[in-house]
Amino acid sequence: MAFVATLSNEEVSALPAVQFDGEIIVVDTPQRLDDACQYLAKQRVLGFDTETRPSFTAGVTNKVALLQLYGGDKCFLIRLNRVQMSKQLTDILHNPNILKIGAAVKNDIAVLNRLRHFTAGGFLDLQDIVEDYGIENKSLRKISGIVLGKKVSKAQRLSNWEAKVLTLQQQLYAATDAWVCVEIYKHLVQI
């Protein structure tokens, strides 16, 4: 199956929305992080993304606040502003036998390394492989539109990821971003 090379913003906006509908687990305590890592370490493929509270001041950047890891039928939203990156977690991010799929992963790995150094292993960046399918657009929203024929909402992108409680809309947005990376990859490799 051939894909179009690009989609306009208008064409993407006209597509039906896609949204994760599995279990979302907010990880905000050390015990929940241990439980999440035990589950995630058994997965062979994970969807991967991060979120950072936006800064509207020139020259000011915030620390990464959220790590999203989707595997099996669950998406874990790891609140890095509430729990420290554990060795168990960095072992997962280092493990070359667990495929971690995301978009623009180099940037995500860099911000995670500011919290705790690790050597990344087993990462696959959708932006790198879509070129092999003739796809020129690099944003996750447009890649999803081209490959799945569905759009990913970006409405929560600039929300406060350090908020005391993540809203349901934030949770769905964050989980969808990690999950859809795996869905796109599965669709590409099955063709």
Image (cartoon, helix red, strand yellow):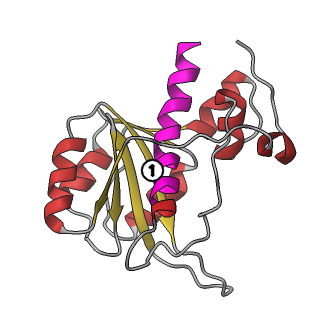
Residue 185 among those drawn in magenta: yes
Residue 62, how many percent across, how many down?
A: 51, 79
The residue at 59%/40% (across/down) is: 18
Residue 12, how many percent across, how many down?
A: 78, 42
Secondary structure found at label 1 = helix
Residue 117, how many percent across, how many down?
A: 32, 63
User: Nearest the camera: 140 or 165?
Assistant: 165
Q: Main secondary structure of the magenta part?
A: helix
Q: Which residue is mark 1?
A: 175
Taking the image as shown, residue 147 lies to the left or right of residue 123, namely: right
Residue 68, how many percent across, how many down?
A: 40, 54
The residue at 45%/69% (across/down) is: 64
Taking the image as shown, residue 126 lies to the left or right of residue 46, namely: right
The residue at 54%/58% (across/down) is: 107
- In magenta, the rendered stretch is 171-191
Mark 1 closeness class: few <14, some 14–19, many ≥20 residues within 10 Å: many
Taking the image as shown, residue 9 lies to the left or right of residue 147, namely: right
Taking the image as shown, residue 102 lies to the left or right of residue 59, namely: left
The residue at 57%/72% (across/down) is: 159
Q: In which quadrant will I find the C terminus?
A: top right
Please give the count of numbered marks on the rendered protein. 1
Identify the amino acid type marked 1: Ala
Residue 65 among those drawn in magenta: no
Q: Is residue 135 above or below residue 110?
A: above
Q: In which quadrant will I find the N terminus?
A: top right
